[in-house]
Amino acid sequence: MQHTAIADQIEEDLHDPHSFVTRYIWSQDHKVIAIQYSITAVFVGLVALVLSGLMRLQLGFPDTFDFIDPSAYLQFVTMHGMIMVIYLLTALLLGGFGNYLIPLMVGARDMVFPYLNMLSFWTYLLSVIVLLASFFVPGGPTGAGWTLYPPQAILQGTPGYDWGIILMLASLAIFIVAFTMGGLNYVTTVLQARTHGLTLMRMPLTIWGIFTATVLGLLAFPALLVSAIMMMLDKVIGTSFFMPALVSLGESLDYTGGSPILFQHLFWFFGHPEVYIVALPAFGMVSDVIATHARKNIFGYRMMVWAIVAIGGLSFVVWAHHMYVSGMHPAFGFFFATTTLIIAVPTALKVYNWVLTLWRGNIHLTVPMLFAIGFIFTFTHGGLTGLFLGNVTIDLPLSDTYFVVAHFHMVMGVSPIMVLFAAIYHWFPLVSGKQLHVGLGKAHFWFTFLGTYAIYLPMHYLGFLGVPRRYFAMGGTDFIPESAQALNASITLAALIVGLSQLIFIYNVIRTLRKGEPAGHNPWGATSLEWQTPDVPPRHGNWGPELPVVHRWAYDFSVPGAERDFIPQNEPEGKGAEG
Amino acid sequence: MRFFKTLGTKPWLDPTMVSNAGVALAADPLAAPRTALRFIMGIVSVLFFLFIITFLSRSQYPDFQALAGQPWQPFTDPTRLWLNTALLGLSSVAMQWGLVAARREQVNRAVAGISAAVFFAVAFLVAQLELWRHLQGMGYYVNTNPANSYFYLLTAVHGLHILGGLMVLANVVFRVWYDGAMARLSGPLTLCAHYWHFLLGVWLLLFALLTSRVETINLLAALCGF
């Protein structure tokens, strides 16, 4: 019997949904799964946003809110960090956008393992439920900080040291299983289900970013799994993988002399690639948004691909720059400082190429473009402070101050979020068939962009003053001037305004879904395949009876002599170019 | 290096090129599962690599007592472990035999080979559990020493991977059987056999590591810079 490749199967053969339940709930369609992932991630992200608001209330106006005690504050810090990094950004960028865009951009009908894809989402949902359940158990969620460093994470004195930490570790393990199932799908689909003519070097940079980030995730998450399993055993059955021999509350514990530093190495062997798991899809998506809205081919496509791959490789050899204050050997510190500075090279190349793509482009200041340009600013600022912190001698005094908080929020908080918004405004017409309101979108952009600067620029200064992170209150610390408190209050006000301004976005989405104008087919004049589907939004199976055939790369914008200022990837040679 | 060659191509300079990449590859029904299996084996390798690295690092702390080397230590005489290893080895051999039969479309032999492979794999798991009981009987509990902890942990993680393999194998066999296309068994069975042999390799590595004397462990740790 002749086997038909999954990409060539026609719609009816492809796990065709017959009822509401199989169409929208137990769906195996990558687009529905992507939306399920996105809604869950955004929901849990909003929880984390509220937590950050509560933290800022305490920092800006101490002794004002009775319901925020030191334990609750630490719990807010921990849950905010973990949710934002793992359950929002990783899930939304890869589970959401990865799922939606990969099959469409590579010209496939679906992921190669649709059932596994469905399983991935439901496992992810389970991990979110387990995580959120920790708010309702005795002792509440863990307050160990998002890095969960032992020994304090599982010892009395840390909030949630009992149930909270167990649920956190269990949730992480479940998340990793979910990610692995999804990730196998993403890489296999990219490698094996591309349509005719779509060579690797014709893929849009979005796919390169998502693909490389997924490979990083598949290789880095095992480190988190290993540390979660071993810490769980230390907690539950009293092994001593990470727990040193110690006296707690005057009582000698049974632990026999493990190594907390070992946990740090494992954690950051995952933790640093995680930065790029978040950043690389953002790099890819912003490249496509910039090229499309500047009507110009991306500058240095091949260099961009190389940079993504190089950053991915290098991200595995920089992890210990998170541990300069752990007492490591100076030669070790030198090595990691060097690799850290080297990784700045391909990253800077990408920034130059984005700017050079804009150079003399036909820039359309649409909402996605505004967010993309905003990203270039926030990412450059966040990246530059990374050069400070990458050097051992500068890192030592700045470690654990608000300078670090400001740095990582700019570089992997604000920047990916800017790209996520750019991507949502860019691809919303494809997903929903409707165009988001431009005025509301611009208001949303300016509040978010200027607001985040109002939050994080002063935070760098607080860091230089020596204000430590994770502190519930400053108390009577001599070296911190009282004016720092005024700055903290202003940061809190800015944070609350930025938080509330996200309601503009939510209102815009709801309003558009209910009574938005139809966006029409390919409203941005984009070249990549996802905009060339016969139906908008794409139907189940994506492509109708025939798969598209790719004849060119994804960046044929403003080609001289062409009748339009873009030539879709599936347009045969000679048809568009000669006009 | 094909990878670097790929990254060096400039398809936009030759726009008439419609390569065979993509669907042509996927026309082989095993292409996608084969790629996925390679990634799975990569991920599992990373997982065990990290466990082993932490083992070597942890072994350099004073409370670590290796499980072999001195007469009173349980794996100085590793006969039981050799027996378990033989079971897993037989499982691999039986799987390979089943695969060869499946390729020759000798359905009955293939089924016999797969059944034997499953039997020996389950026997291995039972024998590992029995070994746990034996160790506990000798007072080597999971939390009395980090070497013990690693033994239980690594054998458990390895056992779970075998269980996962058994589930996938069951799925493969039942799906092929249900479709009434036993002739197509050899393809997916090839991938199962790869995974089987891979897990045997992982086990041999763990076996060597866990029964190493303290001098060997120290040497390995020194080579890793611990």
Image (tube, helix red, strand yellow):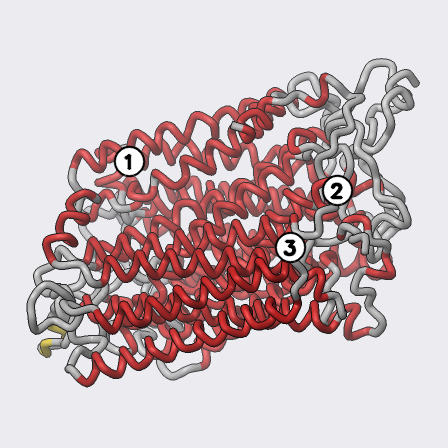
**SS for tag 2?**
helix
- A141 vs B188, left or right, is left
Label 3 lies in what chain?
A: A
**Mark 3–mark 1 CB contact (< 8 Å):** no
- A529 vs A283, left or right, is right
In the image, A71 versus A245, the foreground residue is: A245
**Mark 2–mark 1 CB contact (< 8 Å):** no
Same chain for the residues under marks 2 and 1 in the image: no
| Marks 3/1: CA–CA distance | 33 Å
- B159 vs A495, left or right, is left
Instruction: Give the residue number, with chain letter if any, for mark 3.
Output: A96
Q: Which residue is drawn at 42% across and 29% down?
A: A344
| Marks 2/3: CA–CA distance | 24 Å
Amino acid carrying mark 3 in the image: Gly
Label 2 lies in what chain?
A: B
Instruction: Give the residue number, with chain letter if any, for mark 1.
Output: A336
Amino acid carrying mark 2 in the image: Val
Instruction: Give the residue number, with chain letter if any, for mark 2.
Output: B23
Q: Residue at x 83, y 33 (%)?
A: A570
Amino acid carrying mark 1 in the image: Phe
In the image, A177 versus A488, the foreground residue is: A177
**Lower position in the chain sequence, tag 3 or tag 1:** 3
Q: Which residue is drawn at 79% across and 58% down?
A: A511
Label 1 lies in what chain?
A: A
Q: Residue at x 63, y 33 (%)?
A: A287
Q: How crowded is mark 3: few (under 14 residues within 10 Å), some or many (20 or more)?
A: many
